[in-house]
């Protein structure tokens, strides 16, 4: 009987170790597999990214007041000198610099505004850059869109769309890879066009008249 008891004791310990190992492995797998939930706070107050209430790794959904701020996402009212968002932005942003590494939705007014992804709404600045597609109104001294633009793009000195411009494009110099609608400026340039150019110099690379003053068109 003593021998049997001695044999059972190591077996129990071995089973316990196996069970413990299983549960530790299962817990580790759940932690690894679980989606990372981004925390969002209502209020952000910031002097600089290293001195702010909500850390840069978290998002803000509500109000952000800052001299210089940096957060993973921002939705709501964004007021500051330098407003930086490493993810997506939605709401109203007012600042000297509005910098969004993701996509934007709403209104952004600044001296320099840059959205790396798509933007839908009103993007206004002295220099306005949208890396993706622009839908709505983009107006500034220099307006640049890296993708397509639908709506009205105005650049007092220069307006450029690297993709397709659909709607109205205005400025001293307007330029688009392709356009459908109206270009209005002193110098209007389009690789392809379905619409009208009005200006001193009008150029359509694929047009019957590649260059024509005052009014040029292709349909």
Image (spheres, rainbow, N blue to C red):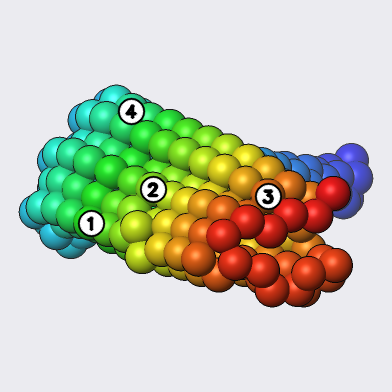
Q: Identify the residue under disc 4.
A: 76
> Between disc 2 and disc 4, whose residue precedes?
4
Q: Identify the residue under disc 1.
A: 111
Q: Identify the residue under disc 3.
A: 196
Residue 59 at x, y = what percent?
Answer: 38, 40
Q: Residue at x 47, y 39 (%)?
A: 137
> Between disc 4 and disc 3, whose residue precedes?
4
Q: Foreground mark, 1 or 3?
A: 3
Residue 66 at x, y = what percent?
Answer: 14, 46
Is 170 left, or right, of 214 in this rendering?
Answer: left
Q: Foreground mark, 4 or 3?
A: 3
Is 128 left, or right, of 101 in this rendering?
Answer: left
Viewer-nearest residue: 71 or 163? 163
CA neighbours of label 4 inside 10 A, class few (<14), some (14 to 19), many (20+): some
CA distance for labels 2 and 4: 22 Å
CA distance for labels 1 and 2: 11 Å
> Between disc 1 and disc 4, whose residue precedes?
4
Q: Quadrant of the N terminus?
A: top right
Q: Identify the residue under disc 2.
A: 139
Where residue 206 sits, quadrant-wise, is bottom right
Query: Does residue 90 appear in the picture of this structure?
Result: no
Element at badge 4? strand
CA distance for labels 4 and 3: 39 Å
> Between disc 1 and disc 3, whose residue precedes?
1
Is 211 left, or right, of 134 in this rendering?
Answer: right
Residue 104 at x, y = what percent?
Answer: 48, 42
CA neighbours of label 1 inside 10 A, class few (<14), some (14 to 19), many (20+): some
């Amino acid at each position: 009987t003593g021998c049997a008891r001695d044999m059972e004791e190591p077996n129990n310990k071995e089973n316990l170790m196996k069970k413990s190992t299983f549960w530790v492995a299962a817990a580790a797998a759940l932690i690894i597999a679980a989606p990372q939930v981004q925390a969002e706070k209502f209020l952000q107050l910031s002097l600089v990214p290293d001195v702010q209430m909500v850390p840069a790794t978290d998002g803000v959904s509500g109000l952000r007041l800052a001299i210089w701020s940096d957060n993973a996402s921002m939705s709501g009212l964004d007021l500051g000198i330098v407003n930086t968002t490493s993810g997506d932005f939605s709401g109203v942003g007012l600042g000297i610099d509005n910098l969004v590494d993701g996509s934007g939705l709403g209104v952004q007014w600044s001296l320099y505004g840059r959205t790396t992804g798509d933007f839908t709404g009103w993007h206004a600045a002295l220099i306005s850059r949208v890396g993706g597609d622009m839908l709505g109104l983009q107006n500034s001294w220099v307006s640049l869109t890296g993708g397509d633009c639908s709506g009205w793009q105005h650049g007092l000195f220069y307006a450029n769309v690297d993709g397709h411009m659909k709607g109205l494009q205005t400025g001293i110099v307007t330029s688009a890879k392709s356009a459908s609608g109206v270009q209005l400026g002193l110098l209007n340039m389009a690789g392809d066009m379905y619409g009208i150019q009005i200006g001193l110099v009008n150029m359509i690379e694929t047009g019957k008249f590649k260059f024509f003053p005052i009014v040029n068109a292709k349909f």
